[in-house]
Amino acid sequence: MSASTAEVLVTYESWRAFAAHWGLIFFGAIFLCVVIYAYWPSRQQQFEQDARIIFREDDDDV
């Protein structure tokens, strides 16, 4: 293996490790934001109304 090839491998491994770590942190933060949004107390009423949409009786049925 030449010095140039070793340098490319080190660079690749560095970028791969960077992407793996920061990608995990980034998507973990997005997941936490979605969970916080879903369980935020002021959203409860809207989510309950949305959950009952399929049980609503519409007068448009023919």
Image (cartoon, helix red, strand yellow):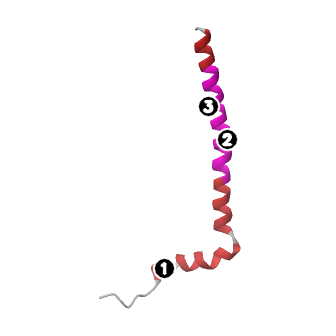
Q: Residue under circle 3?
A: 16
Residue 15 badge = none
Residue at image position (29%, 88%) is: 62
Q: Secondary structure at mark 3?
A: helix
Sequence-first disc among 2 and 3: 3
Alpha carbons under labels 2 and 1: distance apart: 40 Å
Q: Residues within 10 Å of mark 1 (few under 14, many from 20)?
A: few
Alpha carbons under labels 2 and 3: distance apart: 10 Å
Q: Are marks 2 and 3 in contact (CB under 8 Å)?
A: no
Majority secondary structure of magenta residues: helix
Magenta-colored span: 9-29
| Residue 43, percent from left and from top | 64, 74
| Residue 7, percent from left and from top | 63, 17
Sequence-first disc among 2 and 1: 2
Residue 62 in the image: above or below residue 17: below
Q: Are marks 2 and 1 in contact (CB under 8 Å)?
A: no
Q: Residues within 10 Å of mark 2 (few under 14, many from 20)?
A: few
| Residue 24, percent from left and from top | 65, 43
Residue at image position (66%, 50%) is: 28
Q: Residue furthest top?
A: 2
| Residue 49, percent from left and from top | 56, 80
Q: Residue furthest left?
A: 62
Whether residue 12 is in magenta: the answer is: yes
Residue type, label 2: Trp
Q: Residue under circle 2?
A: 22
Residue type, label 1: Ile
